[in-house]
Amino acid sequence: MCEVAFEVGSFHAVGAFYSITHIPRTQQGQLIAKIASWLKRGGMFVASFGSGAAGEWTCKWLGTTMFFGHSGEGETLRYLVDAGLRVRDSSVEKQDNEEASFMWARRSMTANHQPAMSTDTIVEPAIGSGTVPVGAISHRLSFIKAGNSSFQRWGLRT
């Protein structure tokens, strides 16, 4: 997954569900930056990440030995903003024996990304104005279900 390459600005959207958590934490920021570069201006990145404390481990899962790596909420948010993405919505969902954080992030509309704000306030509500402090992201349970109206809410066309 870390080896794949696409042209800059190739996609309107990229989804990465239950995949980034299977690469080492030290490679996650670089991968998110690559994914952000593949997006067209204003493109969406929708992904799941580990939730809770950072860590790496290997265990038996689904009948095989599987590697897991979670960067932790703050570090993941920094990766997203450093890559020129702005988190628009998030949700923490309980699954199996752990929680997963789902995030919708939009690439900047400008050609040269310059972070517009500190990482203390990078979560932008989907409706309304202002920002949500990073600590509040764990408590936002407004994950958008797949469907035509959801894509339209984000300015995407199906």
Image (tube, rainbow, N blue to C red):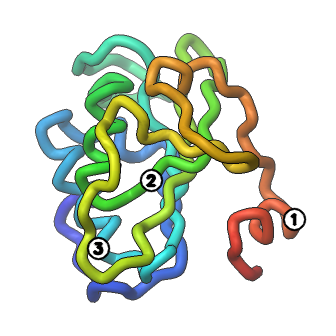
Residue 4 screen position, x and y as percent = 24, 72
Residue 20, label in figure: none
In the image, what residue type sits under mark 3? Ser
Q: Secondary structure at mark 3?
A: helix
Give the answer, above or below, for where 72 lies relative to 36. Answer: above
Q: Give amino acid for label 1.
A: Ser
* 90 to the left or right of 82: right
Which dot marks residue 149?
Answer: 1
Question: Where does the image place residue 134, in percent across and percent down from the top left?
Answer: 44, 26
Quadrant where the N terminus sits is bottom left
In the image, residue 119 above or below residue 19: above
| The quarter of the displayed image where residue 69 is located | top left
Count up the numbered dots.
3
Q: Is residue 18 visible?
A: yes
Residue 86's disc number: 2
For the residues marked 1 and 3, what is the alpha-carbon distance in whole angstroms?
26 Å
Q: Secondary structure at mark 2?
A: strand
